[in-house]
Amino acid sequence: MQDSDDGESSSSSDSYLKEDLPSTVEASLEKLGLKNKVSMVISGDITPKNTFGKTLLVVADKRLLTFYPEEQNDPLVNISLDEIENIETRKYVGNSSLLVRSNGRNIEVLRFTSIVRPKIESLIRKLESYSLGLQSAIVRGNSHAVGMFQEEQRRCPKCGRVIPPWLSNCPVCMSKRKVISRLLGYNRPHIRLAAAGFLLAVLFTFLNLLPPYLMKILIDDAIMSGNISLLIWLVTTLVAVYLLRALSTSGRSYLLGKLGQKIIVDLRRKLYEHLQVLSLSFYDKNETGRIMSRVMSDTERVQYFLTWGVQQLFMDVMVVAFISVILFTLNWQLALIVLTPTPVLILGMKLFSRKIHGIYHKAWRKWADLSAILADTVPGVTVVKAFSQEDREISKFRNKTSELYEVNVKISFLEGLFFPLVGFVMTLGAVGVWWFGGRQILSGTLTLGVLTAFISYTWQFYEPIGRLSNLTSILLRASTSAERIFEVFDTRPDVRDSSKAIELPQLQGRIRFEDVSFAYETGETVLKNINLEILPGQRIGLVGPSGAGKTTLAKLILRFYDPTSSKITIDGYDLREVKQESLRRQIGIVLQEPFLFKGSIAENIAYGQEGAPPEKIIEAAKAANIHDFVLSLPEGYDTDVGERGHRLSGGEKQRVSIARALLKDPRILILDEATSSVDTETESLIQEALDRLMKNRTSIIIAHRLSTLKNADKIVVIDHGEIVEEGPHENLIQRGGLYARLCRMQAALTVVAAR
Amino acid sequence: MSTKSLTTRILEPNVMSIFKDESGDLRLRIKGESEHRIQRILRVFPITMPWNYIVFKDAEDKEIGVLRNVNELDSESARVLKEELEKIYFIPRITKIYDIKEEFGVLVWKTETDKGPRRFDVINRREVKKISRDRILIKDGDGNLYDIPDFRKLDQRSLILLDSVI
């Protein structure tokens, strides 16, 4: 994939595919004279006796050996790599087996569970490249041919764990503290807003501390000594304090709200921009729903933490500190009494939040279950009724509602128990203050004013303590969301323009697959040793059973993925060495499920061709057999197609997408099952449109209906990722292979349908 | 189908004239060609370019060609064509909004348009569409269209009412 850090990655790859050997096996290898020539060691985890246990596969000096060290020292299998005709894995339930074909015989080499699978896939790829003469691959344990697995072997320098290939940082070593500090970085561009909000928060905290103190002066100095002017002064001050407090609150709300929106807009934009840059493989791995929740709700949660959460935290700490100081200066004995319930409070809060967190989660899951039932049965009501399963569905729903009921009752119980209890503990503190304070008043060492102020401060003190004891869970929630967001940011696109990438000139359209293999990141090999040459202007039909790898092959031409080994060239240019944009600009694609975006028909035809003259749009629509239909709509080409084009029928959408491809005027055209989801009448309209589209272009047609391929110059039959037949229609029919069989089957089906 | 021409003929405004004959039919005369009785005229882009790209169809409903810009015609032809288009595409422009009330999810609009006062019901909020920065297009429950070419130019009260639904 890239050629950086060759030395480093080869060493890490060594440790990946070269595990330690037990001494018995080493001894046995010594006997065979292979000890110092070991290049790969992989352990399997299922023994020949069909139990869990260690077996070993060793590659040494062009030989493949397996050991079962618990039972015997000599190798179970010992064959030369040159004798191997084929190597493959067979997937069973809960385990897989590595099979080698040699001298016409299948030998089971190793059995393993899916944990070992990536290593085995990697091994196979290396052995395959070996058999193709790429000996260096096996000796050095590294080469361009296995570039993809080179990335899989990156390890975290700190903890030694393998870093998933789609991440740039080790997810484990990305500590919570680092996440939070990275998160706080998002406040930086808006530092002025944040600072202003913070100042107001400080002001608010300070103002909140004043009233109890004023109360003390009121009782001790104004009331007790009958000082009316002081009373007036105090009342006015109190009004001013409350007014200022209200003003600072509203100012802070506004500032923080604005800050929050700025942060969230920032985050969402950046996320979306990054999502657009990411390769298709990212989308293979992540469901739409999960991606959407990252952009929508995770950003929201992070934003809330960054604004309100952080400030509340500071304020709480400040309040606790200030009040402690005040309490101790007023009367240190009473202050100690105030502090006594604090440990109980902190502990209780911690226990409670731990307990309730699990239950909240459970309630949420039950809630989700309930909506899942609705989402299932409401659209499926026809089936429910047809099978008279109403009662069954009712009882299912009934069960789920009672489960939800139970959880919610439990929540009510716990909350009902805990909060009054906390209140009680806090009153104990306050009552203690009354008791000791009261005695001090009686003995004349304390004034009533101080006691009143004390009690007010006590209440103000417990509240932030409760919140702060919950701090870890707040931080945890924020950092989890933040991690999910950062995970996207840290994902690097697999397919990138190299720094030396050149602009692809106007193409002729000669496509060459030079012994291309491709595997998705799960390790499953999809295409094997594809050799294919497509000449400029040729029409190629790609045929084969579902899952044979036809669409993947097309995606490789668009460079949505890079081949795992070898290369694809167009007009002699290696796809990896040209700018993606300049490549894709010259390739048109029509898919089975045409995708239209919300907007007018004209906008959809001109997608990617902004500023295309209206005449061209009309011409493309005419060639796509959609012009007359569009004109018949009251809003003509300005008709809004709705989200995903839902206002148009399947055939109409397809023709719009053909018009789109026509307007793009690409040199290479890929049609992926373009006619398979429409009725026969529309099909002829579409077929006609497609024929116009394909004229003078290199076209690759993937089709299930083989009748649509009769005009193809060459038909390529793919099965299990390999090209099994190739040639014009008549030749393949005569040959009587897979293609002929598929044709016969379809002809038979047509006859059945005609009856 | 395939006999149809795929290219679009662009009609030259300086060689054509449009007029109505005694029976009230629209006619198109192109210099050096026979005269066409026009069965239909269609806007290709009725919303975004109402005065550009007009398709003419003859008595057999065959496409004669496309006129790029109505205003390039001689003034009389332009007048006739515009009048006809205004008739075919009856899209009142809202100049003032008196009230928008929600009744059981239906928006009841009371407006003043360039074609006179109009009261209409919008069933789905999504039918009040902002199609560009300044422009709003509304489709009522019966499929009639209403246009607000620049909503920022509406009076304050109309704007406030409109703002509550977009």
Image (cartoon, coloured by chain):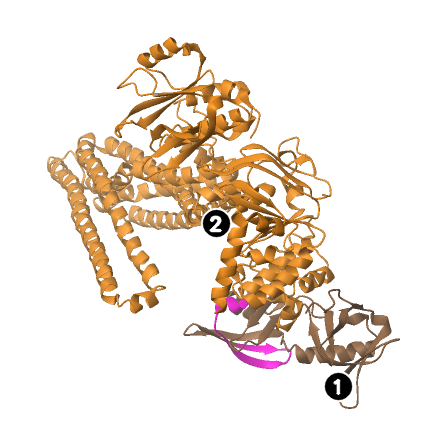
Chain colours: A orange, B brown
Name the residue at the bottom extreme: B23
Q: Residues within 10 Å of mark 1 (few under 14, many from 20)?
A: few
Q: Nearer the viewer, residue A742 or A623?
A: A742
What residue lies at 12% left-to-right and 39% top-to-bottom? A438
Judge from the rendering whether residue A476 lies leftward or rightward of residue A532; answer left or right.
left
Label 1: chain?
A: B
Instruction: Name the spot of residue A560 as percent of width and height, x first.
Output: 56, 42
Q: Is residue A31 visible in this depiction of the protein?
A: yes
Q: CA distance from mark 2 to mark 1?
A: 58 Å
Considering the numbered disc 2 on the image, is that residue within a helix, a strand or a loop?
Answer: loop
Q: Which mark is residue A546?
A: 2
**Type of amino acid under label 2:** Ser
Q: Check if residue B131 falls in the magenta segment.
A: no
Instruction: State whether residue B64 is above or below residue A201.
Output: below
What residue lies at 32% left-to-right and 38% top-to-bottom? A316
The range drawn in magenta is B110-128
Judge from the rendering whether residue B122 lies leftward or rightward of residue A589; answer left or right.
left
Mark 1 highlights which residue? B25
Dominant secondary structure (helix, strand or loop) of the stretch shown in magenta? strand
Instruction: Name the spot of residue A22 as percent of width and height, x first.
Output: 32, 15
Instruction: Name the spot of residue A362 as percent of width and height, x first.
Output: 25, 48
Instruction: State whether residue B145 is above or below residue A450.
Output: below
